[in-house]
Amino acid sequence: MKVLLKMLNAIFVIFGVLFLVLVIAVSYFWVADPYNLRSLGLSPASVVNSLTGSSKVEIDNIDKNPLLTEEQEAQLESFGINPLTLVL
């Protein structure tokens, strides 16, 4: 019985360590972005087009930056700045 408990303990420790390493790796890739995945330029319209398979989908009001009002977004666009590219 003690051998079974030791084996179960070892298995749970191994799975715990693997889970911890996985959480650390995912959080590193999320924060550090070493492969520069954020700059792929995925806009909401392109995501909808890829999901629906149609480029005829129209989106009227896209909140490009949740921290800005529509007027602020319009001013930035009039200056040639894309509100999607601003860092939150």
Image: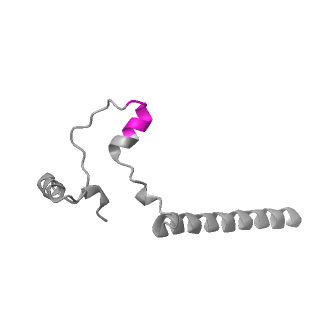
With 60 as the anchor, is 9 left or right in this view?
right
Tell me, yes or no, whether the highlighted magenta stretch contains residue 53. Answer: yes
Residue at 15%, 52% in the rendered image: 70
Q: Position of residue 36 (x, y in %)?
A: 47, 63
Q: Nearer the viewer, residue 27 or 87?
A: 87
For the point 70% across and 62% down, the residue is: 15
Q: Where residue 8 sits in the image (x, y, percent)?
A: 79, 62
Q: Would residue 44 be counted in the magenta stretch?
A: no
Q: Image check: 70 left or right of 65?
A: left
Seen at 38% across and 36% down, the residue is: 49
11 displayed left or right of 18: right
Is 45 in front, or is 23? 45
From the viewer's perspective, tell me whether residue 41 is left or right of residue 23: left
Segment colored magenta: 48-54
Residue 23 coordinates in the image, percent (x, y)? 57, 65
Q: Tell me which secondary structure the magenta stretch mostly adopts.
A: helix
Q: Nearer the viewer, residue 6 or 88?
A: 88
Q: Quadrant of residue 12?
A: bottom right
Q: Hey, which quadrant is residue 7 in on the image?
A: bottom right
Q: Quadrant of the N terminus?
A: bottom right
